Amino acid sequence: MTAFTPKDPDYEARVRASFARQPMMETLSATLEEVAPGTTTIVSTIPPGTLQQQGQTHAGLAFSIGDTAAGYAASSLLPKGFEIVTSEIKIHLLAPGRGDRLVAIGRVIRPGRRLTIVEADVHAESGDTRTLIAKLMGTMVPVPLTES
Amino acid sequence: MTAFTPKDPDYEARVRASFARQPMMETLSATLEEVAPGTTTIVSTIPPGTLQQQGQTHAGLAFSIGDTAAGYAASSLLPKGFEIVTSEIKIHLLAPGRGDRLVAIGRVIRPGRRLTIVEADVHAESGDTRTLIAKLMGTMVPVPLTES
Amino acid sequence: MTAFTPKDPDYEARVRASFARQPMMETLSATLEEVAPGTTTIVSTIPPGTLQQQGQTHAGLAFSIGDTAAGYAASSLLPKGFEIVTSEIKIHLLAPGRGDRLVAIGRVIRPGRRLTIVEADVHAESGDTRTLIAKLMGTMVPVPLTES
Amino acid sequence: MTAFTPKDPDYEARVRASFARQPMMETLSATLEEVAPGTTTIVSTIPPGTLQQQGQTHAGLAFSIGDTAAGYAASSLLPKGFEIVTSEIKIHLLAPGRGDRLVAIGRVIRPGRRLTIVEADVHAESGDTRTLIAKLMGTMVPVPLTES
């Protein structure tokens, strides 16, 4: 993967402050672990309210943390005063979501002034085992903070 | 749209019973309104815990109810003893999610024994106004209940 | 569908001139039929060189004319001096491509200054019968002519 | 990447024979280079008839060879008597296609009896430089040869 140079030296504080203002992440018991230029990691401890009818994680949980990890990966490369909005994203569900936690790793594929292409992998972790359960690829749009 | 003939006369009861077992739908304050052959409608009253950092609905809310509405649209056409699993789905976010409620309408585009192609539109409603905020298209896979 | 107002009164001549400069369209025996604000129709007579190993049309034929019809649908709404570049597009193949011709109808879902969301339906026509064989949805980006 | 074990010892001959029957690949001056379990490489020398109006490769060229490389990657893992059909695929165009040739590398992400998830990267090569111009991810469906 290409290494990216952030345009805003305070990118990590900016990303963490934005994440902390997302009620949806609290609802999903999701926390922001790693933040580095062009990549972030989000972990959900899979609260009971995120399951579907078969006791597995709802596709919406993998989507929500995958989309958010990919969005903040894009956001980490923006200049100050900009925010990210998801334009489109596709998710493939590869295996049932079960275990102690879901881990979403978002990455920038190609940054850009008008749009940033991103991807995310979502893993289910249970003890020492880790299973890839979803892959996402999508388009993020940088918008000035006043516009969004 | 093509009219579909259900293979299971009890399709509506089956779909409603499955929906009632989804904790994620309760977390999102989502209820299953219409169920007809090849289409379902799900409404969320947008609880505060589904917002993102700008006070709009998180992309994961539109995704979760859109995916679920599309999945049950596919499920309504299955024979008894089968359930639906999402294989992949793409969402385009077209406008900010704000208002009194989000309404997701799922529809079958092409049913099949091995896979069913579906779509969903998600609207934000506020008083008398209705705005299309997201479109989804994806692939659902029928699986025997014992397998899933 | 929403009616769109073109920003360039000469949109049709501009779109037709651009189409005429595409060698790939000639290779696919594709012609530009209708051009209206926010929609275009492209027809391929399915030359033998566009088939796959089973004698059906290659997925790349439906993709190429669907993508091009959607791109010119977006282009028809641009001001003079701009051109469209495809950023991403997803295609669902719904039925085998066979018959006298493939007809792709592209439409704008939501125009925008930074990006335009589009869709396309591709039909196979054989005598009087018409079968929907593919659906596309994607993102087009307007770029100044000097930039592209 | 996971290593895959082919179910058909003659997978390479089977894949190469199928490729040789695709007129579309000849139209695009595309040849099948590497064939290994779960991955194939296809190269196009970019004939003039595959360009668009700005002299770059048409999105349909990257799509066609990317889809075909991904499809044969899936096909390499099938038992004898089966063939692959593309169900859906999404392409992100990341950079203009220019140069001496386009190289598409298809890979299986997750094989399956009912469907196989695949990806492909498409690079433009010019002398010693190689640029990633497109990424694809999609769903392939195995079908018995008599059915397709």
Image (spheres, coloured by chain):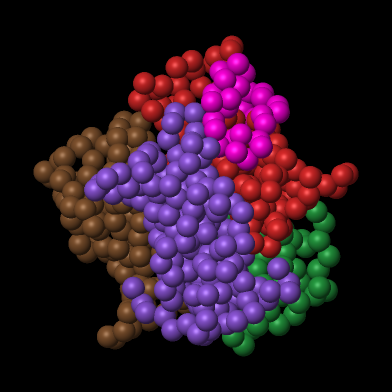
Chain colours: A purple, B red, C green, D brown
Please tell me which residue lies in front, B39 or C59: B39
Q: Is residue B131 visible?
A: yes
The structure residue drawn at horizontal position 60% and vertical position 22%, both measured from the top left corner, is B16
Residue at 27% over, 85% down: D128
- If the image is split into quadrants, where does the C terminus of chain C sit? bottom right
Identify the residue shown where x is 81% and y is 73%: C7
Judging depth in this view, the residue of B98 and D22 nearest the camera is B98
**Considering only vertical position in the picture, is B143 above or below B132?**
above
Kindly give the residue lying farthest to the top in the view shown. B9
| Side (left or right) of B81 relative to D14 | right
Percent from the top left, x then y, of residue D55? 50, 80
Residue D60 can be seen in this image: no
Query: Which percent across, then down, holds residue B82?
Result: 45, 21
Going 18% across and 52% down the picture, which residue do you hit?
D3
Residue B49 image position (x, y, % from top left): 64, 48
Most foreground residue, A7 or C91: A7
Q: Is residue B37 magenta?
A: yes
State the image coordinates of residue A139 (x, y, percent, origin top left).
Answer: 54, 64
Q: Which residues are magenta?
A: B12-39
